[in-house]
Image (cartoon, rainbow, N blue to C red):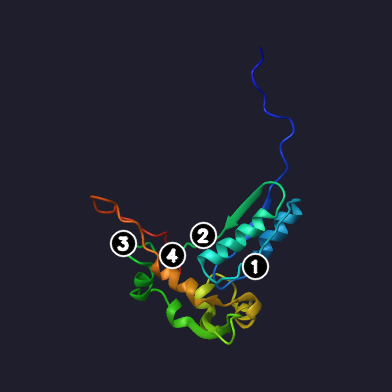
Amino acid sequence: MSAAQPSAQPGPPPTVVPVHGAFADASSWNGVIERLQQQGCTVVAPAIPLRGLAPDSAYLASVVNQIDGPVLLVGLVFVAAFAPDGGERLGEVEANSTDSILNTALVQRQYPTGQDSETAVEFTINPALFREALAADLPTKQTAVMARAMACQPPCGSRRIARAGQVSAPSPVGRPAPPRWPPACPA
């Protein structure tokens, strides 16, 4: 009796699905997409609607479920981020932060909901504060173009921002949370 051997033919390669975050669109992955395609990878970069966790998740699931074969989802990890304590809400942390300028950089707009004449609030980032608030690590010339191009700075629905503000870190039962430190982000 011989030992089991790995298959000589692996399954099909996965389709890579890069997922953008708030105030961005799928083009933010262009450099990565180009490198993956040069390596022969199939890439599908969906335009997430940025209307809230539930609708955005449903949209992404619908895209992924229509892809034949294995899928590799890829998301961003922000190095400059907040790390709320147990029971603390992200919106409260951001509002009390002396480091963040995101709230002061937001510009409120209205968009039609498609239900009669009803509108809802969405936010974009003030072009004058775009680089400092969202892309300080990119070249000034590149962020100037991004700040002016709405295609590169899609609005973010207020429900999405409100939901993010309601998210709180879990609080451990019966003992205080261990200390946490967010990753350092050099200026």
Tell me the element at label 3: loop
Could you say where residue 124 lies in the image, as x and y percent from the top left? Answer: 54, 80
Which of disc 4 and disc 1 is earlier in sequence?
1
Instruction: Residue under label 3, please give it.
Output: 87
The three-letter code of the residue at mark 2 reads: Val
Please give the name of the residue rendered at 47% of the width and 62% of the height, measured from the top-left corner.
Answer: 79
Instruction: Residue under label 4, please give it.
Output: 81
Please give the name of the residue rendered at 45% of the width and 64% of the height, measured from the top-left corner.
Answer: 185
The quarter holding residue 51 reads bottom right
The three-letter code of the residue at mark 3 reads: Gly
Distance CA(mark 1)–CA(mark 4): 23 Å
Marks 4 & 3, CB-CB < 8 Å contact? no
Instruction: Residue under label 1, please give it.
Output: 47
Q: Nearer the viewer, residue 131 or 160?
A: 160
Marks 3 & 1, CB-CB < 8 Å contact? no
Please identify, in this view, whether the residue under mark 2 or under mark 1 is nearer the observer.
1
